[in-house]
Image: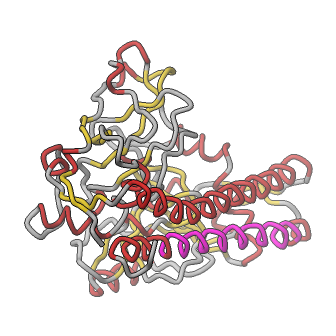
Amino acid sequence: MNWGRVNLGDVAEFKNGLNFNKDQYGQGVKYISVADFQDYFSVKTEGLAELKEDFINPSYFLKKGDILFVRSNGNKELVGRNLFIENTLEPLTFSGFCIRARFTKEDVLPKFYAYLFKSKFFRNTLSANAGGTNINNLNQSILSNLNIPKPPLPTQRKIASILSAYDDLIENNLKRIKLLEEKALLRYRGIVKEEKLDEKSILDVCYVTDGTHDSPKQQVDGYYLVTGKHLIGGFIDFSSAYFISEADHDKIQKRSKVVNGDLVLSNIGTIGNVAIIDSPFGFSVKNVIIFKPNDPIYTSFLYCYLNSNEMKTRFQQESSGTSQRFISLAYTRALKVNLPAESVLKEFHQEVSRLLKLKSLLNQQNTKLREARDILLPKLMNGQIEV
């Protein structure tokens, strides 16, 4: 292939994000922080925090086609993670731990490069610029000097179109996942509202413990260390978790082992995210409360109970701490749960467990779609597969 190459700084300009203080929070302009990147291709504006518009310089507003990069983070694996701004139907800005790239030439397609920056090529190129190691901080100079391929514009469009088909499927699955979650919670609210309930201690229906408080050293390979911030949408997001050694994993497992059917609740920093363990990955957990139901019929009801708006609000209001908020193991062991009659509970579990299972299958399908997309990209780029 006779594709040319160019330094990214020759076709794009860069800007660091906005710094602000607590007095500038308020309704006005939604902003994107590092926590909002997750493993998304394009930005999800629903639920973004907001800033007052009057202090924001217009130069910090995002435009269609912009790409954001994580500039700095305690987890090295997240530095360089990127997010495509597919549209700007409402005003958007970005925080100081991000860098914005905005293309300045007409013969480059931003969406093509958004896919390129999601590839291992980009991670390897960043590592090479950092001397062969994980990069600690990204800056405008590093981005500007990245030497990247520059196919003809029609080729860029074809590759972006091929890869977009995968993202369209992923997006449709995400919409279905959201509908299934809403249906499960709607059924739960109906039970709470219409049935006669009996208050029980949470310890009457499950064993409650917590994850490790240790901080094992990060490894190149091994077992995932999953923390509360990796509980996204009822699932575990392994994409930003890091590896720990087998010895550290075994040590944690002796104290806080999780198995399929357990529920985990984020309880430090990020508070109130819930997931049911249904993953085949080998992993340990940190900064979570673990609920081990005494009987499988409790699993679906406990998930909806912990994931309800009422409990999420309560966790936020009753959390402790100043520099970092948390809910303690003692606090969660003292929780009370209102349960319906056993016959109603069994019927609820039979119905809702099917919804949650389908939700899980769709999430697994999305994982495979992302993997297939990410495998396809380099093959399109190096000519193994004809565009």
| Residue drawn 24% across the image and 38% down it | 14
Q: Quadrant of residue 251?
A: bottom left
Residue 336 at least partly seen: yes
Q: Quadrant of residue 134?
A: bottom left
Q: Position of residue 117 (x, y in %)?
A: 33, 58
Q: Which residue is more in the foreground, 63 or 56?
A: 63
Q: Bounds of the magenta span? A: 347-371
Q: Quadrant of residue 325?
A: top left
Instruction: Please state if 231 lies on the left or on the right of 355 as rendered.
Output: left
Q: Is residue 28 above or below residue 93?
A: above
Q: Position of residue 302 (x, y in %)?
A: 69, 63
| Residue drawn 53% across the image and 37% down it | 317
Instruction: Please state if 135 lies on the left or on the right of 119 as rendered.
Output: left
Question: Is residue 265 a member of the stretch shown in magenta?
Answer: no
Looking at the picture, the colour scheme in use is secondary structure
Secondary structure mainly formed by the magenta segment: helix
Quarter of the rendering occupied by the N terminus: bottom left
Q: Position of residue 335 (x, y in %)?
A: 62, 54
Q: Position of residue 87 (x, y in %)?
A: 52, 38
| Residue drawn 52% across the image and 58% down it | 232
Question: Is residue 367 a member of the stretch shown in magenta?
Answer: yes
| Residue drawn 67% across the image and 43% down it | 310
